[in-house]
């Protein structure tokens, strides 16, 4: 199969299929980072936050079951192979969460809205990707590496591997049990259990993240090219996609490109199905200024945190990396601060 399709095309197709599911989850299941935080803080509604718990629990169980069965080696993922830096996780998460609230979307949410015709999100996507790349490999990269050096870890940077010896259980067993606990806690709500659609789409997101791990590992192990072992995230991959669009004749497809295009396509299909597709643009210069500023902050924050609300909030959480809970809580805190500032510090446009 790989000989006929090509390894780069294969990982792009895997990303595309997972991205389609994520785009549909955003439009049909209203799966959204900022929306879940806003519902929880200002509407006392935790159902969309519990959707994230379902996604994390399903992905975690799947990842560590696959690791235990030898289908993947999760210690090879960047989340576990790179030495964790607490300050980078906290600062990056706070910046990402604050920027997300100021501009009104995370990278994943902006792609989903763009797929529904929201051209305001096009600005967010572009600025976020450019800012992220500036911090990743552009003019801010040297400063970032100087302040927060990136080093290979001597041991897997994951909670199950740390706890394995102390508990006398395998890392896989600990990961599966932790995932089951997260899933049970997420489902421990009558109002949430009465909304099977939300539970379904939360599980779909978790399976999409798992599909990325399984698919890219299979290609990396079966093929001859050094394809990265990864799954879905939406800051640097958006920059990768823009770069591919500009250099496709001398460049190859990747999982990142497939994932981003998949979210756009899934969101487009979902918005047509719901009858929600419509072209929208920004009419208020102050709103545009907020979106540009927030997107730039969000892009830099994601690179410092080594992931966005999906990259750290679900993908890294599925590995139970040290960084994931700290970044997740920092994103929540940053978003709460940004939302509070918007509510108290900005007057509506006249």
Image: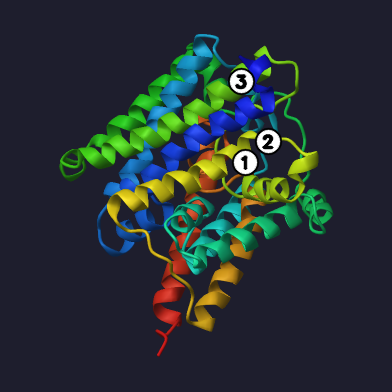
Give residue 266's quadrant in the image.
Answer: top left
Q: What element carries label 2?
A: loop
Q: How far apart are marks 2 and 1 (CA)?
A: 6 Å
Q: Can the viewer see residue 181?
A: yes
Q: Which of marks 3 and 2 is in front?
A: 2
Left/right of residue 29 with respect to residue 97 in the rendered view = left
Q: Residue 159 placed where, x, y %?
A: 54, 28
Residue in front for this viewpoint, 243 or 337: 243
* Residue on which disc 1 sits: 257
Q: Circle 2: is it few (<14), some (14-19), or many (20+) Cα within 10 Å?
A: many
Q: Circle 3: is it few (<14), some (14-19), or many (20+) Cα within 10 Å?
A: many
Q: Residue 274 placed where, x, y %?
A: 28, 52
Going from N to C along the chain, the mark reached first, 1 or 3, is 3
Q: Are marks 2 and 1 in contact (CB under 8 Å)?
A: yes
Q: Residue 342 placed where, x, y %?
A: 44, 75
- 310 up-or-down from 54: above or below: below
Q: Which mark is residue 253?
A: 2
Q: What element carries label 3?
A: helix
Q: Residue 199 placed where, x, y %?
A: 27, 37
Q: Can the viewer see residue 87?
A: no
Give residue 296's quadrant in the image.
Answer: bottom right
* Residue on which disc 3 sits: 217
């Amino acid at each position: 199969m790989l000989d006929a399709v090509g390894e780069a095309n294969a990982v792009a197709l895997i990303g595309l299929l997972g991205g389609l599911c994520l785009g549909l989850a955003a439009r049909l299941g209203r799966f959204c980072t900022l929306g879940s935080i806003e519902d929880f803080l200002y509407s006392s509604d935790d159902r969309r936050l519990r959707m994230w718990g379902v996604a994390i629990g399903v992905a975690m169980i799947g990842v560590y079951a696959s690791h235990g069965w030898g289908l993947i080696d999760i210690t090879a993922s960047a989340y576990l192979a790179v030495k964790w830096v607490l300050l980078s996780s906290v600062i990056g998460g706070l910046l990402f969460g604050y920027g997300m609230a100021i501009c009104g979307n995370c990278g994943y949410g902006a792609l989903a809205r763009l797929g529904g015709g929201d051209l305001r999100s096009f600005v967010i996507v572009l600025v976020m990707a450019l800012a992220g790349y500036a911090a990743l490999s552009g003019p801010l990269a040297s400063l970032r590496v100087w302040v927060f050096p990136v080093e290979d870890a001597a041991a897997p940077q994951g909670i199950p591997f740390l706890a394995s010896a102390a508990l006398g259980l395998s890392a896989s067993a600990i990961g599966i049990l932790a995932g089951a606990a997260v899933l049970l806690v997420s489902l421990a709500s009558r109002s949430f259990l009465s909304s099977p659609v939300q539970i379904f789409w939360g599980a779909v997101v978790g399976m999409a993240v798992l599909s990325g791990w399984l698919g890219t590992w299979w290609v990396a192990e079966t093929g001859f090219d050094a394809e990265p072992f990864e799954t879905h995230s939406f800051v640097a991959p958006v920059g990768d996609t823009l770069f591919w669009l500009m250099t496709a004749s001398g460049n190859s497809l990747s999982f990142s490109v497939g994932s981003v295009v998949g979210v756009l396509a899934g969101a487009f299909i979902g918005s047509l199905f719901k009858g929600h597709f419509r072209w929208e643009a920004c009419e208020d210069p102050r709103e545009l200024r907020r979106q540009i500023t927030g997107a730039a902050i969000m892009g830099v924050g994601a690179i410092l945190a080594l992931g966005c609300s999906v990259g750290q909030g679900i993908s890294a959480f599925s590995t139970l990396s040290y960084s994931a809970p700290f970044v997740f809580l920092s994103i929540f805190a940053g978003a709460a601060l940004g939302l509070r500032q918007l509510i108290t510090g900005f007057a509506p446009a006249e």
